[in-house]
Image (cartoon, grey):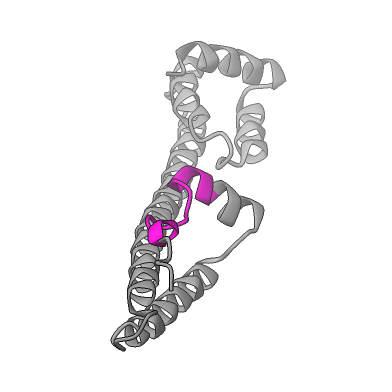
Amino acid sequence: MPKKDLSIWEGTGLPDYEDWHMFSVDSLDMTQPEIEGWIEACKKEAWVHEQMGKREDEHQEYNKAVARYFWRRCDTLRDYLKILEKDLDDDDKRVKDAAEWQDVLIKNVSCDILKRDDIARTYAVCLGYEDKIDWKLVNAAIIARWSPSGLSYIKNLAWKLAP
């Protein structure tokens, strides 16, 4: 019997993290439990081939190669999941930071000793959290204290000051 080419079982068969994330998480909208299920399926496949690789027959090397492939795939998916969890934790922290800056900004607006230039500096920091800030609420507070033109002044200065 001719020897099988086992080189197809080298590597993991997975793209790099960025491509994997774009395809699996963004496009397919895979959730953490689904990814964990994928990892479990790889572990089961690896275990089955590992057991079959213990038999001394013409398929032994093939089964060992396939088992190693699925163990590597499992390890890579676990690494990807750790990165994904860290990214999600960072996003949760970003939401919390944005909420704190939003509270500071609204409190500062109500503080009579602070002027529009002071508010613009805090507003500039909040621009870094643009998608996490309730801008309608913030802008309404500024308009209530000053006016629509006061809001315009603060926004223009904030954009100049923003990092």
Q: Which residue is situated farthest in the right direction here?
A: 148
Q: Position of residue 147 (x, y in %)?
A: 68, 21
Q: Point out the image quarter for the N terminus.
A: bottom left
Rendered location of residue 136, percent (x, y): 67, 38
Residue at the (34%, 63%) spot, across then down? 72
Residue 34 vertical placement versus 44 (above, below) = above
Q: Nearer the viewer, residue 137 or 58?
A: 58
Q: Quadrant of residue 70?
A: bottom left
Picture residue at 38% right of the left edge, 65% below the top: 69
Q: Is residue 55 left or right of residue 66?
A: left
Tell which of 39 and 58 is nearer to you.
58
Q: Say if 70 sits above or below 100 in the image.
A: below
Looking at the picture, how far across and down is residue 150, in whole percent?
Answer: 63, 17
Q: Which residues are magenta?
A: 6-21
Residue drawn at 40 percent across, 85 percent down? 48
Query: Which of the pair 23/70 is nearer the observer?
Result: 70
